[in-house]
Amino acid sequence: MKKVFTILFATSIVASLIACGDSQTKDKAVAATTTTDISTDPNYQKGLDLVAKSDCLTCHKINEKSTGPAYSEVAAKYAGAADTTITRIAGKIISGGAGNWGAVPMTPHPQVSQTDAEQMMKYILLLKNS
Ligand code: HEC
């Protein structure tokens, strides 16, 4: 009888170890998918190229406030916003603006087209969890 118990006990430990290992593997798989997801989104590379070509990164960091708000904060604020809002905020990249994040204004970027500004917004919106 004692032997049976020992065997049962040992089996259940092995079973729970396997279960545990399983869920860790799954967590890792989920994390890996989320990380690769945004960089494989065509809007990511296109928007990043435009942002990198312009002066955006002198005032904005991905996940830390600089002169301007962190892009992850901007993404969190406008995640799920209506298309009209995204279009309007893209317009602010071109015309400049202040008051949404503090008193410091964003300089205008008249050389950026509305299409490019919207592409930059699509990239920024992907950075929500960065
Ligand atoms: C001179 C510094 C500076 C530069 C350069 C700059 N920004 Fe900004 N940006 C700011 C500041 C400051 C704010 C906050 C403005 C406010 O409070 O409404 C801001 C806000 C924003 C917002 C949020 C706007 C809102 O109303 O919520 C976006 C999006 C943005 N910037 C994108 C960009 C992009 C894209 C570029 C490059 C083309 C860029 N910024 C270049 C300083 C800058």
Image: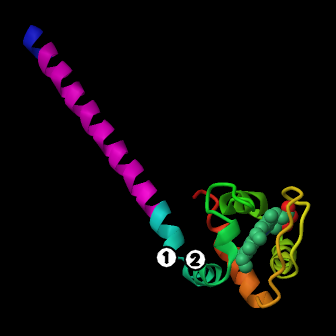
What is the residue that sits farthest to the left in this orientation?
3
> Residue at the location (16% across, 23% down)?
10
Spatial CA distance of label 2 from label 1 is 7 Å
- Is residue 26 in the magenta section? yes
Residue at image coords 50%, 73%: 39
What label does residue 44 carry, if any? 2
The residue nearer to you, when weighing 107 against 118, is 107
- Tell me which corner region of the image, top left, top right, bottom left or bottom right, holds residue 126: bottom right
Which residue is identified by label 1? 40
CB within 8 Å, label 2 to label 1: yes
The x, y position of residue 23, in whole percent, is 37, 43
Q: Tell whether 95 sits left or right of 19.
A: right
Q: Quadrant of residue 86?
A: bottom right
Identify the residue at horizontal 38%, vertical 56% (top origin): 29
Q: Element at badge 1?
A: helix
For label 2, the SS is: helix
Instruction: Say what amino acid the circle numbered 2 marks.
Output: Tyr
Magenta stretch containing residue 47, yes or no?
no
**Amino acid at circle 1:** Thr
Q: In the image, which disc is placed on residue 13?
A: none
Is residue 30 rendered to the left or right of residue 122?
Answer: left
Q: Quadrant of ligand 1?
A: bottom right
Report which quarter residue 87 is drawn in. bottom right
**Magenta region, residue range:** 5-33
Q: Is residue 81 visible?
A: no
